[in-house]
Amino acid sequence: MRYRENQITIMTKFFLASAILLLATTISYAQVNASVGEASDRPATTYQNAPALQNFVAGFPEINVGFLHVYANPSIDPEETYLMRGTEASSTLKALLPVDFQKMARNMDAKVYGAAAIRGINENMYIVRMDGAEQDRLELFAIRGNKVVHLKTLAYQFCESGKCEQLDSYITDVDGDTNLDLVQISRVMRNSGVTAETKKVFTLQERNREWKKTNQLEVPWESIKFYDSRTDDK
């Protein structure tokens, strides 16, 4: 009887030890993979030792990207829902933009806005809106090596000498790989109507976090439409 009890005790201890070992292994694996996931889901740094960059980051409202239509709207109604409205940029934010874009804003006589921060690959990307006297633009930037760098022109709309030009972007995940894709459409319009129209698609590369042109994605073109103030604001 005592021998049988000892056998039961030994077997109980063995299964208990095995269960503890399995649990510890599982927890260890989960913690490692959680840290990898967190690293890919948030910016790599909070710029604690760079107050100017902290000011830059704080100037952008964070938004989630599902199927984000980025377009220039020359006449924003105060009651209109316009995701790129943003908040007026601080002098620090404007001073951190690349020199060419500071000059562009001055030449446009534009007010500059921090329109949105969207999540890229191990970083946030920042959409700046320039509300000019005769044209409007939206430009995409990121912080690389403690410096603000330009990534892509996302949208513009302007008219001159009887010709109007428009660029719209859709930021989404076309192929479901969890990395963003960029669909761009542009057109030239005259009094006679649309005289030229182009479509381009880009994928965000993990290797260098740059946009690469592609023709390999199945884009839902029926959902990709230009912003038109004559109908879309009604």
Image (spheres, grey):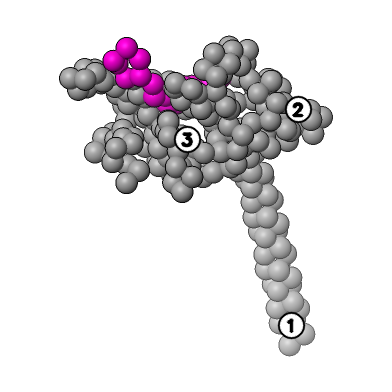
Of residues 93 and 145, the one nearer the viewer is 93
Mark 3 Cα shell of 10 Å, populated few (<14), some (14-19), many (≥20): some
Circle 3/circle 1 CB separation < 8 Å: no
Residue 228 point in image, percent of width and height: 31, 35
Q: Which mark is residue 52?
A: 2
Q: Which residues are magenta?
A: 150-164
What residue is at 52 percent from the left and 17 percent from the top?
Answer: 108
What residue is rendered at 29% in x and 16% in y?
A: 163
> What kind of residue is marked 1?
Glu
Q: CA distance from mark 3 to mark 1?
A: 59 Å
Queried whether the magenta region covers residue 168, the answer comes back as no
In depth, the one of 19 and 201 nearer the eye is 201
> How far from the left and from the top, in percent, is residue 214?
35, 22
3 vs 2, front mark: 2
Residue that label 1 marks: 5
Residue 125 location, quadrant: top right
Local secondary structure at mark 1: helix
Residue tagged 3: 179
* Image marks 3 and 2: residues in contact by CB distance under 8 Å: no
Residue 24: image location, x then y, percent: 70, 57
Q: Residue at x 52, y 39 (%)?
A: 85
Q: Residue at x 42, y 24 (%)?
A: 156
Q: Is residue 22 left or right of residue 71?
A: right
Displayed quadrant of residue 35 = top right
Q: How many labels were placed on the picture?
A: 3
- Distance CA(mark 3)–CA(mark 2): 29 Å
- Looking at the rendered structure, the kind of residue marked 3 is Asn
Amino acid type indicated by mark 2:
Ala
- For label 1, the crowd category at 10 Å Cα-Cα, with few meaning under 14, some 14 to 19 and many 20 or more, is few
Q: Quick one: SS at disc 3?
A: loop
